[in-house]
Image: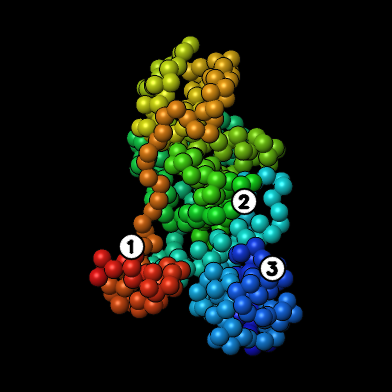
Amino acid sequence: MSSTENLFATRFKSARLLNGFSLQDLADVLNVQGHSLTKQSLHRYEKGEVIPDSEITGWLSDALNVRPDFFTRTTHIEIGKVEYRKLKSLASKEDDRIIEQTREYLGRYLELEEILALPLIFKNPLQGFRAVREYKDVNDAAIQLRKKWNLGDDPIYNIVELLEDKHIKVVPLDADMGFDGLQTTVNKTIPVVAYNSRKIVKPDRIRFTLLHELAHLLLNFDDKLTDREEETLCHQFAGAMLLPERAILQELGKHRTRLYMQELGHIKTQYGISMQAIVMRAKVCGIINEHYAKQFFFIMSNNGWKVDEPVDYTGEEKSNRFDQLLLRALAEEQISMSKAAALKNQKLADFKKDFLMAF
């Protein structure tokens, strides 16, 4: 098999998994679209025995919702061990789809950074921190990370932007509802955190999920911890990052026997942390006791507020870094308009429509 055949075969399989299709599923979609390709023919493409001509490549790209150049993209993406937060019932083909979505997004992102010759340097700011065993450890880790990143005790305006500024790639994934997030390393050096944008849509939940995954990424957990204990500590780290201990003590005081929804709402809108996470934070900081926390969650459940809390956080959780780099590459004539559209994963006409004001 030639390198060209091998590349097409690899990219073709990636596109199929990206859509969650079996070879028969893809054959069925093509037939509905009026193209007669058998499962056996598609199998030969995936094995690299045959490379389809440009017309059939166009059919495949339409059926798989990718641009034709997807099949010839050469940017190397090696995904390391993936740590999921998911339900056990998540189907294996959904695992594949999540991995391929991550690979596809990062392939375009890293290719753009290579074109601009940007350094891909990340150093764990918590490297050498002690093994995490209990709440005090994750709280101290959050304090140290905020200090390393010069955040003080102030609210963090945009978690996605912060992480990307620190050379941590953030990937929104359209996945099964049984999946929350993941963290991994790409090409052995580039850290990645991802979240399910179909399930996690509220900005306060996006923030908490990303910081939970960040804990998995940065911290060294004691081997004796159970999975559940580790998850709890990651939750506590996310809470400590969003609402530092000194900040919550300043907002609520050292001891309380009652909390008002209005004050929790005020803290939520200021710090971008859910009311439920604030109460958990107050409990672990010793401000309220276990009994009061249980009463609060009972009230939240009875009022249907566990998903839709009575106060919303309206902050924005996204980064414009990719688009900014894309426009920079265009302005500096390092890429053509057609290449820019391909990196944005859009048809040229759609790309021009969306970005026309920039020219």
Residue at image coords 59%, 31% = 134
Is residue 303 or residue 223 the one in the foreground? Answer: 303
- Amino acid beneath label 1: Gln
Quarter of the image where the C terminus is located = bottom left
**How many neighbours does mark 1 have within 10 angstroms: few (below 14), some (14-19), or many (20 or more)?**
few
**Spatial separation of the CA atoms under disc 3 and disc 2:** 18 Å
Asked whether residue 321 appears in the rendered view, the answer is yes
Task: Give the SS element for disc 1.
Answer: helix
| Colour pattern | rainbow
- Amino acid beneath label 2: Asp
Residue at image coords 35%, 76% = 337
Closer to the eye: label 3 or 2: 3
Is residue 158 or residue 124 the one in the foreground? Answer: 158
Q: Say above or below: 100 vs 183.
A: below
Task: Give the SS element for disc 3.
Answer: helix
Task: Give the SS element for disc 2.
Answer: loop
**Spatial separation of the CA atoms under disc 3 and disc 1:** 37 Å
> Reading the chain from its start, which is encountered first: label 1 or label 2?
2
- Amino acid beneath label 3: Asp
Is residue 59 or residue 11 the one in the foreground? Answer: 59
> Reading the chain from its start, which is encountered first: label 3 or label 2?
3
Q: Which mark is residue 25?
A: 3
**How many neighbours does mark 3 have within 10 angstroms: few (below 14), some (14-19), or many (20 or more)?**
some
Quarter of the image where the N terminus is located = bottom right
On the rendered structure, is 98 left or right of 209? right
Coordinates of residue 100 in the picture (x, y in percent): 59, 63
Provide the residue designation for mark 1. 324
Closer to the eye: label 3 or 1: 3
User: Residue pushed farthest right?
Assistant: 40
Q: Which mark is residue 176?
A: 2
